[in-house]
Amino acid sequence: MNQTSSSSGAPRGASGAGASDIRADHWVLRLAPRQARPYLRLARLDRPIGTWLLLFPGWWAIGLGDAYGGDAAANPGPSWWLYLYFGLGAVLMRAAGCTVNDILDRDIDGKVARTATRPIPAGEVSLTQAGLFLLILLLVSLAILLQMNGLTILLGCASLLLVFPYPLMKRITYWPQAWLGLTFNWGALIGWTAATGVFGWPPLLLYLGGIAWTLGYDTIYAHQDKEDDALIGVKSLALRLGAGSKPWLAGFFAVALAFFGLAGWAAGMLWPFWIGLAAVAAQFAWQVIDVDLDHPANCLTKFKSNRYVGWLLLAGILAGSPWAGSLWAGLA
């Protein structure tokens, strides 16, 4: 393994702080009390893209579940309270996952310039404080989960079996993005069961599509860190695929589109859904064609653009639902 610090003990990193999306001037941090800022940074509230990527599969599944198996009379409209609960849950669980990650990676983070300023390696939050913060996050998340039906509660608790091992995957395999996909898209399963109370094919197809989507966007993200990852000896698909990543990205996104389409078809989506899916396809094509895998800032921009994928597919699901069909019929 290459050395990860200089002879003086200062942290090093090939990408450096310039490749980081940490923003000390973010409005969340500016408005918060000084004592709370390290915990907000630990929870990544100043970098919400991860929360959006965790949230959208759940929102998609709620939309599909609301639409499934009936007409407008049987499906009067969206379950807005579920969207709210899942929004809060995504913030809390993303914060919990980041806290687990930073606890387990504290030694690695302290050796790389890009991550050395994180609250734990920087000494702003102790391990005990981080553990207590994690416990509070999990307890509040559980309180929200207990508002759901029994099947959703069971699946929600099972997600912890994926959340806690994830930070270790980059030490074990060049495919940690696959484990992230399993974890981040679990909402596709529990969003459906929260809306319907039962399991079915549409959420499973949506889940598989989400895993492929994550393989694509997180491989792009990993390319901004590939020099640091090689330096500290951790693995990623960016290192495994290297300069040949673009065809794989195209393949990952194509598989995602196929499963998203199958999920929509299985749930009985109306024609507007397919317009939304076509817009997602165009966004995927732009990412693959325009991404510069050797330019960290470009990779970060493409990674963050996946929030538009979330919004486009959600718009297609809502517009393609049977309850919305009556609106289109009225306009016709």
Image: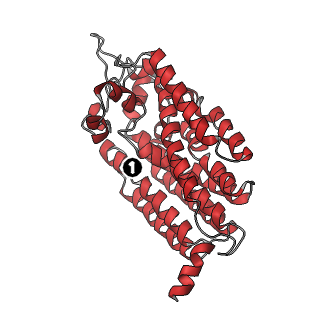
Q: Is residue 78 above or below residue 99?
A: below
* Residue displayed at 66% across by 47% down: 148
- The location of residue 266, given as percent across then percent down, is 69, 66
- The location of residue 214, given as percent across then percent down, is 53, 48
Which sits in the foreground, 298 or 242?
298
On the image, numbered disc 1 is attached to which residue?
304
Q: Is residue 18 above or below residue 276?
A: above
Residue type at tag 1: Lys
Which sits in the foreground, 65 or 246?
65
Evaluate whether residue 170 shows in this view.
Answer: no
- The location of residue 11, given as percent across then percent down, is 31, 19
Farthest residue to the bottom: give it: 332
Which element type, helix, strand or loop, lies under badge 1? Answer: helix
Q: Is residue 166 shown left or right of residue 124?
A: right
Evaluate whether residue 50 shows in this view.
Answer: yes
* Residue displayed at 75% across by 54% down: 198
Quadrant in the rendering for residue 263? bottom right
Which sits in the foreground, 76 or 57?
76
* Residue displayed at 41% across by 46% down: 49
Q: For label 1, count other residues whose C-alpha is less than 10 Å away and answer few (under 14), some (14-19) or many (20+).
A: some
Farthest residue to the top: give it: 8
